[in-house]
Amino acid sequence: MADNSVEIVEGCRLPVLRKNQENEDEWPLAEILSVKEVSARKLYYVHYIDFNKRLDEWVTSDRLDMKKLQFPKKEAKTPTKNGLPGSRPSSPEREVKKSLDLNVQPTATATTTATAPSRGKTLPTPKRKVEPVPLAPQVSPVTPVPSLPSSAEASQAAVYPAARETSTFKSREDHEQLTSLTTQNGTARRLIPSQPGRKRKANCGGTDEMIKVLQYNNPQSASVYLPPPEDSQDSSDGIPSAPRMTGSLVSDRSHDDIVTRMKNIECIELGRHRLKPWYFSPYPQELTALPILYLCEFCLKYLKSLKCLQRHLTKCNLRHPPGNEIYRKGTISFFEIDGRKNKTYSQNLCLIAKCFLDHKTLYYDTDPFLFYVMTEYDPKGFHIVGYFSKEKESTEDYNVACILTLPPYQRRGYGKLLIEFSYELSKVEGKTGTPEKPLSDLGLLSYRSYWSQTILEILMGLKPDNGERPQITINEISEITSVKKEDVISTLQYLNLINYYKGQYILTLSEDIVDGHERAMHKRHLRIDPKCLHFTPKDWSKRGKW
């Protein structure tokens, strides 16, 4: 359906033919990310709007609906320092000159204009201006309402929310008179200028009732701050406003470019499996043009041809991941790998994991991490099934940084086994833990399912005490399972178990929930046996342990 008279360029949007899960034809809207020509035939790399990136693919022109072609919109002119739309943006040199002029010749309006630079500031940031701050169109009567940003700046804030939020808070230091800004859901949020020697508390709105639950169940415990349920992890599109300075693997999506948005590896051969990657992974550039990338399934070294792999296997002595085997039951084993002691293996593991994880970034410095690799044993060796990583020291109580089950082993219960193992380690350490956010779509489903089954298993195992209804507190559930209290509460809310009855909160288990839980547990054959775990936690705060 492509019209050869119209040239399709990167950024165009149009319906593209694809097969859905029922193998029926559908025409979802897609964006053209790249165009290439192979054997005098044009191919288009498309991203289906509102679909997961793993479905992105190269398509031929006959799958494009040219009748509904949308060309990329031209960006509106960038506003100048005074926030006037339609003016030509200033160059960095001109910005410096204007700033110097403003300092030499101050005007009477400098103290009343919201976009004027602060006193004592002589050199603005050359690359990006932070003076024009988008303000909420609806604010309280006592709040001054400056001019709104231009359409170009508003669209930039929508595309790069992380960068916009960061610059907003930077500009707040320069303009204390700004009192509100627009959050990503369009509501007005009040900014209170920071006072020296005082820290602002986190906003915990909407949690008063749950705090009362904890106080009622356990009068001795203090009030606990409970954030919104983890299901709302996408309240900011799952994008942190700034990357943490510790060993976090959360991706700062504001730096995405067209290269990292496209899959660069066609196919990976790992042992007896051939895997089709879902996302970009930074393998060496010369390997991305190969039809198949070969990996040694024991050391994960990448090679460019089958002959190179065969030659490597004659010299590779590994038949299991390097590290200590800390769990074995049947054919399932877990190996603990130190990212500092086994740096090459850890980096290779991160490279293959990035092919199937979009929400995480890749750190070549693997020293702050431990990797727990799950394997399946047969006479040829221990074959990797999946893994999870965790920080040696986590200030946020994270017990998982990245978690992945390789595609050939998905939907077979291995994902829940990895999650269960991570919580077993937390039990041995005497801590409660939670996975690092944001979770991928599949990760969120797996964790939500595990939390539901684990909590329901405890609730259904409670026995009445002296003929009265059994009682349990949120803290007790958290201590038994090592699941963080916030995750326990979000799961109870997700299952809709909490009810208010006669002045107290009760958990009501309906027959549908009980029957569904029993069916799910009947299918769950793979479980971790704590007796088979041989694990001694280390105190990583002592650097000598590293």
Image (tube, grey):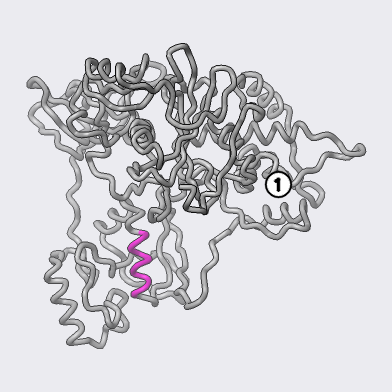
Q: Amino acid at mark 1?
A: Ile
Q: Give residue 341's position: percent from left, percent from top.
A: 41, 39
Q: Quadrant of residue 83?
A: bottom left
Magenta span includes 484: no
Side of 400 where 283 appears, left or right:
left
**Front position in the image: 112 or 448:** 448
Compared to residue 309, the image places residue 488 above or below, namely below
Compared to residue 82, the image places residue 295 above or below, namely above
Q: Quadrant of the N terminus?
A: top left
Q: Magenta segment, principal secondary structure?
A: helix
Q: Which residue is mark 1?
A: 474
Q: Give residue 238's position: percent from left, percent from top.
A: 43, 46
**Front position in the image: 403 or 528:** 528
Q: Give residue 504's position: percent from left, percent from top.
A: 79, 50
Q: Residues within 10 Å of mark 1 (few under 14, many from 20)?
A: some
Q: Quadrant of residue 307?
A: top left
Q: Decide if residue 301 is in sight here.
A: yes
Q: Decide if residue 439 is in sight here.
A: no
Start-end of magenta stretch: 165-174
**Front position in the image: 412 or 515:** 412
Q: Residue at x 42, y 58 (%)?
A: 183
Q: Give residue 154's position: percent from left, percent from top.
A: 30, 57
Side of 398 where 451 appears, left or right:
right
Side of 89 where 83 appears, left or right:
right
Q: Quadrant of residue 305?
A: top left
| Number of numbered discs on residues | 1
Compared to residue 93, the image places residue 531 above or below, namely above
**Front position in the image: 381 or 295:** 381
Compared to residue 433, the image places residue 139 above or below, namely below
Task: Tell which residue pokes out farthest to the right in this image.
Answer: 466
Q: Secondary structure at mark 1?
A: helix
